[in-house]
Image (cartoon, coloured by chain):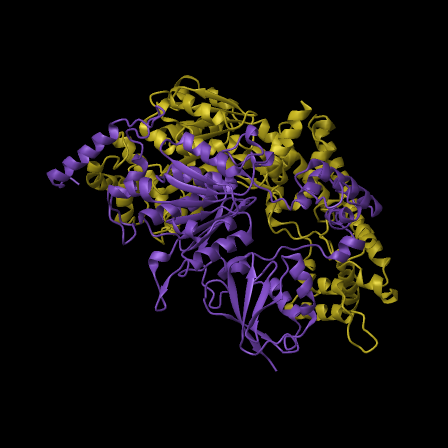
Amino acid sequence: MAATKASKEQKYDRQLRLWGDHGQESLENAHVCLINATATGTEILKNLVLPGIGAFTIVDGHTVSGEDVGNNFFLSNNSIGKNRAQAATELLQELNSDVSGNFVEESPDKLLDNDPEFFHRFTIVIGVQLPESTCLRLGSVLWSASVPFLVCKSYGLIGYMRLAVQEHTVIESHPDNALEDLRLYQPFAEFKNHIQSYDLDSMDKKDHSHTPWIIIVAKHLEKWLSEHNCQPPKTYKEKEAFRQFIREGILKKENGVPEDEENFEEAIKNVNTALNPTKIPSAVEDLFNCEQCNNITSQSPSFWVMLQAVKEFALKEGNGSLPVRGTIPDMIADSQKFINLQNVYREKAMQDAAAVSKHVERLLQSVGKPPESISEKDIKLFCKNAFFLRVVRCRSLAEEYSVDSVNKDEITSSMDNPDSEMVFYLMFRAVDRFYQQHSRYPGVYNYQVEDDISKLKLCVNSLLQEYSLNVNIKDDYIHEFCRYGAAEPHTVAAFLGGSAAQEAIKIISHQFVPFNNTFIYNAMSQTSATLQL
Amino acid sequence: MADTDEPEKKRRRVVELAEKMVVDGGSGRTCEWEGRWNHIKKFLERSGPFTHPDFEPSTESLQFMLETCKILVIGAGGLGCELLKDLALSGFHNIHVVDMDTIDLSNLNRQFLFRPKDVGRPKADVAADFINSRIPGCCVVPHFKKIQDLDETFYRQFHIIVCGLDSIVARRWMNGMLLSLLVYEDGVLDPGSIIPLIDGGTEGFKGNARVILPGMTACIDCTLELYPPQINFPMCTIASMPRLPEHCIEYVRVLLWPKEKPFGDGVILDGDDPEHIQWVYQRSLERAADFHITGVTYRLTQGVVKRIIPAVASTNAVIAAACATEVFKIASSAYIPLNNYMVFNDVDGLYTYTFEAERKENCSACSQVPLDLHYSPSSKLQEMLDYLTESASLQMKSPAITATVEGKNKTLYLQSVASIEERTRPNLSKTLKELGLTDGQELAVADVTTPQTMLFRLRFTS
């Protein structure tokens, strides 16, 4: 047991550094359903099996064709004629013995007819190359059951993904460029005291040059406020003056030449970002105003309970601010000064988290739940990420497809540029219509291409008419989609395979932020777009 | 299509029938089967509104790609494994792959051609075996070597080269090699001597793919500033003022290990040896305790010592796929290739940005113009050495500088051979005048970042 644990840590080392042990645990508890083991499907699954999801189930009623084997790494030519779910499961399972692979030799339509609750057991369902009717039927079942649904298609040189999840909360969004939470504007009591303990004017050179820039800015800000009627520097001119003010604080040699004090240079460089007041981000304010936040019940997910607790904290102990994050960036300083300063922030963060904890307890009690329902660890993590909380809500497929709620604005404004990626979304919709009408895709055989162009154009026009979309789709795109003949070239499948798998991992782990809600990839130009439909 | 004349229709019918016939591959494996290339053929045999102006639909392109076209994949790691699969399934059956590494357990979360039983074996060999047995008819030839161990005769044989490297130095070397293969006639570049270079790179959830036509488009060195130099912690922080757990680990790696030689004289710290890492970890904990620093873990220790970059299968899949698409476009002329740089990031949703990286007029690698170096005659050679290593546009690792002085070839400074380093070290503190250098003279600089010697022109300032 211990040996496997150690070797798993080694095997997954490179990804554990991205989503941590708890992220990995959520993957290992997940059961993913893939519908249709086409190249796109198996590529997606490959990128989920390799990182070690707990289990997968492939649902596919098709038999393997020669064409299938030609673009699919997980089908071999001796599986031609066999059920595709079974054939693909074998070679995917072989990738990682930690993962449990299953297959159902059935079409999703049959399952929807006979046993729609079959799909309720999955952490996420990924549907690949689904005809529109199946997609919508399945979408409705999964939406009602709150099972996230990821729809994927590779068609010629175009990739398409659609995420349908009602409400997806993210505590650890891991933003790329987050501003530090330093509270220089309104220093909390312990920080104020700590700043008081410094007297820059009486320090020897060594101490002076190794004082953290945060202290330097704080000290100079104190002086500035007293000389400027408690008004901090706001305009560019004022900030310039403030930077100059700090520069004047640099020690000078006997001949008047300034010493080399890197910590002061750091202070000057950081003035711009450090002097921003600690506001509650608007995204978090929006969350505070949500119904789920303000109406805590015994059914409320812990995210909302903790959010309401943080909201109450902000109104009370926080004095209008979120809990202190507790981290500071590295900076030129001697060890002791840095550690002491870091501890000031750390202790305040712990204090704030404890206060939030009390609010959580009260809320849980008020709805008859035991206080242990939400752990201290979870509360601390929530507080640490309070500035970065995100909730993703996608529109349902039903909403997207309904004439009453179609997002006309998004479609027509995108199509102001007739070559925007939106045109591919419309072509997909038209192609789906073609399939509905003709029970086949356009241009699959060479002799069909020319005739299908006019047939596909009719589908385009009926689509635009039905939704009252006043847009123009160039004939070139109609021709191109007939040319594709529903081909699924491997490199496009592989691109989508990587993209979709990572979105699935985001959904499973609740880390990093999923897209909302349609992603189009154009391999001709190597461009992409995210649309909200 | 309906108007094709009868002989053409008949020829196509014959080809279709031939494809249906099973060809025995010797081991009872079939190398072709009906419909195998259907997904690809539509792009090779049909005209379309977005194809490259040079594109002509033909049934022969597939044969060219399968039988004649030769692709070189550099690296058989995260990107390399994906590239080999993508190319093999896109109709390329003559592929060579170069990789100097052996397989490690930590590779298995994304380098899917390898299994636990393969740990320790050369990546190139195992990757080639896997692809060749999974994809009938595909012939991947492995080279368990450094790219620098192969010469221009080797590289010249390829139509397209795709890189899945994890080092900027190696990229620059490859870049330099392809530039050195360019043939100019009367100052005009012979397009036949151009070998397109597709380069992919990934780091965590970020990646990029670019198309380089050596001599024509921006090369690796043209955009060197896009790769900022790696930041190392300052020595005084490491030695006397640690603040972060990383500082404690670096202290042990850089100062304590050479001092204590825990595993014997001359034994270098090996990041892959768990015993070494354990030693560093324990000592780092002690160092951290002395300064009341928290956060030293085994994982962090390994990460700092090995400079580990986090990696997942998904990003590698995306970037390799984009690169392979470009290989296909170029080999088949089916579409206009990426022009010329795509950036990808899926931390928050999915984001791509595509732009045309521009050639640098005075690029140290591809501009063919010897770069001017401006120094006063009383400048010391050390200054020049510092510039060569620290300048963002050159970023050399250990440049060796030679010059023709008084008719003789003189090595001014060379680091890589200990005896020569010792002999030429005093030159670093000599002035350029003392070394006998004259205004306008050529200096030749060799470095690992380029296979060819770089020429500079010395210009004296007053």
In-front residue for pair B209/B144 = B144
- Tint of chain A: yellow
Q: Quadrant of the N terminus of chain A?
A: top right
* Count of numbered labels shown in the rendering: 0
Q: Position of residue B70 (x, y in %)?
A: 37, 45
Q: Is residue A119 above or below residue A396?
A: above
Q: Residue at x 57, y 44 (%)?
A: B204
Drawn side of residue A140 relative to residue A242, left or right: left
Q: Is residue B303 above or below residue A6?
A: below
- Which residue: 49% across, 39% down? B124
Residue B151 is at least partly visible in this image: yes
Apparent colour of chain B: purple
Quarter of the image for residue B24 reads top left
Q: Position of residue B135 (x, y in %)?
A: 39, 32
Pick the residue in front: B148 or B176.
B148
Q: Position of residue A206 (x, y in %)?
A: 84, 63
Residue nearest the observer in this picture, A24 or B140: B140
| In the displayed structure image, the side of residue A336 where residue A120 appears, left or right | left
Figure check: B183 above or below A83: below
Q: Report the quarter where the C terminus of chain A lies.
A: top left
Residue A274 appears left or right of B335: right
Q: Quadrant of residue A201?
A: bottom right
Compared to residue B178, the image places residue A258 above or below, namely below
